[in-house]
Image (cartoon, rainbow, N blue to C red):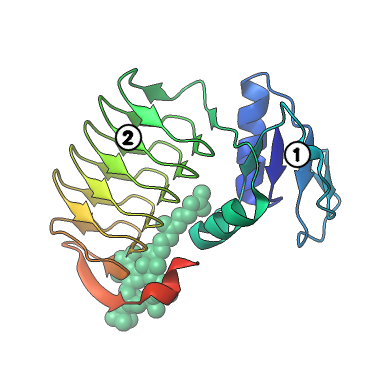
Amino acid sequence: MFLYGAGGHAKVILELLELNGLSCTGIYDEYAGKKQLLGYTVSEILDDAYKQPGAALIIAVGNNKIRKQLAYSLAAEWGMVIHPAANISSRSSIGKGSVVMAGVSINSEASIGQHCIINTNSAVDHDCRIDDYVHISPNAALAGSVQVGEGTHIGIGATVIQGIKIGKWATVGAGTVVIRDIPDYATVVGNPGRIIRINGPEDAGL
Ligand SMILES: CC(=O)SCCNC(=O)CCNC(=O)[C@H](O)C(C)(C)COP(=O)(O)OP(=O)(O)OC[C@H]1O[C@@H](n2cnc3c(N)ncnc32)[C@H](O)[C@@H]1OP(=O)(O)O
């Protein structure tokens, strides 16, 4: 498995690979300014090795917009990795390029898009629909049938009650309690969550 990205998020993914008995064949980061990550070599030059038959790449970058831009520019076979201590319903689905950290629960008939981060100890309950490039931060909890649009960031420890629809490229602040639908591009904070800003399509990365 190849990784693109050599920051803190990449460290967590490297350890997921190790726990799954998968070898990391290469790490690319053209802007990292470092040669090593956890003892693995980091290459600043993007060669074609990750495009060889049988190779797969995970974009190990936490920023949702940058992950989307890279997904379009790198054009690879996408890998996926799930922590062995995640509870994943056999009736759920997870898209290519996504990563699922320790302690996560993904319950029945939930669907996770491509290049998502489902971070440590978060919960995505039954029938949730998570679109591509979403990040569900550590300890966030989504009740049943919540929808999260493309590129949205759910902050650490946020709580979303059942049936809520959250638009695309929105931000839910740390610890926010979401009890009403959230429009596209909105930033919502507090308990109950209130909108403090609405950006535009320029916030969507591409
Ligand atoms: C493994 C990992 O590290 S995963 C990463 C997890 N990280 C996160 O979840 C971070 C989530 N980010 C946040 O919560 C941020 O505060 C954001 C994105 C919601 C807002 O950030 P900014 O746009 O920089 O807003 P800013 O800090 O200027 O705050 C604007 C106002 O909102 C308030 N505010 C900001 N965040 C929150 C919050 N989480 N809860 C309540 N109020 C908040 C501020 O107090 C401020 O209020 P004021 O105008 O009355 O002073």
Q: Residue at x 69, y 48 (%)?
A: 4
Q: Residue at x 26, y 58 (%)?
A: 176
In the rendered view, does 163 fall on the left or right side of 135?
Answer: left
Q: Is residue 52 visible?
A: yes
**Which residue position is annotated with label 1?**
50
- Give the x, y percent position of residue 206: 50, 67
Q: Quadrant of ligand 1?
A: bottom left
For mark 1, give the secondary structure: helix
In the rendered view, does 53 fall on the left or right side of 34?
Answer: left
The amino acid beneath tag 1 is Tyr
First-in-chain label (2 vs 1): 1
Q: Is residue 38 visible?
A: no
The amino acid beneath tag 2 is Ser
Q: Residue at x 37, y 54 (%)?
A: 150
178 vs 122: above or below: below
- Give the x, y percent position of residue 32: 76, 59
**Which residue position is annotated with label 2?**
111
